[in-house]
Amino acid sequence: MHEINVGADLLASNDAAALHNREHFVDHGVYVLNLMSSPGAGKTTLLEKTVQALRERYRIAVIEGDVQTSEDADRIAKHGVKAVQINTGSACHLDARMIDKNLHHFDLDQLDMLIIENVGNLVCPAEFDLGEHDKVMVLSVTEGHDKPKKYPVMFHVVRAMVLNKIDLLPHVDFDVDLAIRSARALNLDLDVIKVSARSGEGLEDWYRWLEERIERVKATATK
Ligand SMILES: Nc1nc2c(ncn2[C@@H]2O[C@H](COP(=O)(O)OP(=O)(O)OP(=O)(O)O)[C@@H](O)[C@H]2O)c(=O)[nH]1
Ligand SMILES: [Mg+2]
């Protein structure tokens, strides 16, 4: 009797597609960010602020992943930045092939940064490499400081955690130090940036973090 490990096969085939995407991104010197969080943590709000702040300095485009609707892509497009929506239907994450199929919408030579907003979910997106340079997650203080312990893979795979909605800290029971300690126990080198995408507090730190990443990729472009 043959036993087929569907999960492992799926991830192996995704890794091959991700490698293909990554070669494109590296060749064209475009920095690619995979932004993940649970539903409603503030990914699109953060992206709206980010494109407004950086669009004069960098050529930016966005891929929006959602189960359905194009509402997030519409929110980004309002700021004059190209945004392509991918609807995953029943899938709880984006995969590398979905990104590959949509890259023809962009002239990668004309981009400095491509941001991919993943489907709101703290589990599945963490397992699928899209070929991005960095995975970053948004954790909102309304979600509770126990999230690193409950969703360890997500906190393990990201390069940075944006702690969002800090304007709400006086109203919620969220221990910032405990959340950061638990996240770093899973990921020693994790960068943590505390922001309010609403009030703007901390966003300059986030922009500086991105600029450093974009410039590093530009400097090592092969084409
Ligand atoms: N108070 C406060 N509200 C925020 C902040 N950032 C986002 N919000 C609100 O949180 C809600 C969800 O924000 P979105 O940006 O749509 O969240 P999202 O992560 O893109 O959501 P999905 O795409 O559905 O997963 C909206 O009502 C935002 O206005 C913040 O820093 N402070
Ligand atoms: Mg969104």
Image (cartoon, grey):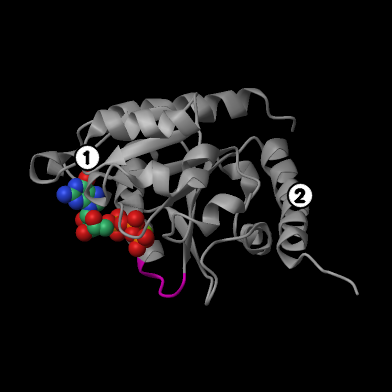
> Whereabouts is ligand 1, in terms of quadrant?
bottom left
Instruction: State the residue in front, 130 or 27.
Output: 130
Q: Which residue is mark 1?
A: 196
Is 99 left, or right, of 68 in this rendering? right
When the figure is inspected, residue 102 is found, relative to residue 117, above or below; the finding is below
Instruction: State the residue in front, 149 or 40.
Output: 149
- Earlier in the chain: of badge 2 and badge 1, it is 2
Helix, strand or loop for disc 2: helix
Q: Residue at x 27, y 51 (%)?
A: 143
Q: Which residues are magenta?
A: 67-71
Disc 1 Cβ-to-ligand 1 distance below 8 Å: yes
Q: Which residue is mark 2?
A: 20
Q: Residue at x 41, y 60 (%)?
A: 120
Is 206 left, or right, of 62 in this rendering? left
| Tag shown at residue 116 | none
Q: CA distance from mark 2 to mark 1?
A: 36 Å
